[in-house]
Image (cartoon, grey):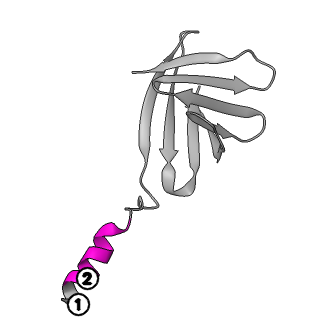
Amino acid sequence: MVVATVSAACAAEPRRPPEDEVRRVMFDCANGEQLEMRFFPARAVALLMRNGETIELQQQISGSGFIYSNGPTTVRGKGRELTVEIGRVGPIRCTAR
């Protein structure tokens, strides 16, 4: 009976992603460029891979979809759509492959 209780308690715990778990998504953008996002959910961090550059972004609170930012660079997304905002440059709209 004790074993059953302990097993049930462990099964009820939500699974936490491993620290090194990564989700990679490739995007095609309206301006013709391609970029990759690497999401690390356990660390609330994402990497934007664009034009040979890697930019680390911290997850932000979002009412819907997701937002990652480091100040000058912000990535917003929902579903397959992604918008990249870099400084004063107009937004870059992208769609997941």
Mark 2–mark 1 Cα distance, whole angstroms, equals 5 Å
SS category of the residue bearing label 1: helix
Q: Which residues are magenta?
A: 4-13
SS category of the residue bearing label 2: helix
Residue 16 image point, x, y percent: 42, 62
**Residue occupying image coordinates x 23% and y 90%:** 2
Which quadrant of the rendered structure holds the N terminus? bottom left
Q: Which mark is residue 82?
A: none
Is residue 46 among the parts visible in the rendering? Answer: yes
- In the visual, does 37 lie left or right of 13? right
**Residue occupying image coordinates x 44% and y 27%:** 26
Q: Amino acid at mark 2?
A: Thr
Mark 1 surroundings within 10 Å by alpha-carbon count, few (fewer than 14), some (14 through 19), many (20 or more): few
Is residue 54 among the parts visible in the rendering? Answer: no
- In the visual, does 65 lie left or right of 9? right
Reading the image, the residue beneath label 1 is: 2
Residue 58 image point, x, y percent: 65, 47
Q: Which mark is residue 5?
A: 2
Mark 2 and mark 1 in contact? Answer it, CB < 8 Å.
Answer: yes
The residue furthest right is 88
Mark 2 surroundings within 10 Å by alpha-carbon count, few (fewer than 14), some (14 through 19), many (20 or more): few
- In the visual, does 31 lie left or right of 79? right
In the rendered image, the vertical position of residue 86 relative to residue 16, given as above or below? above
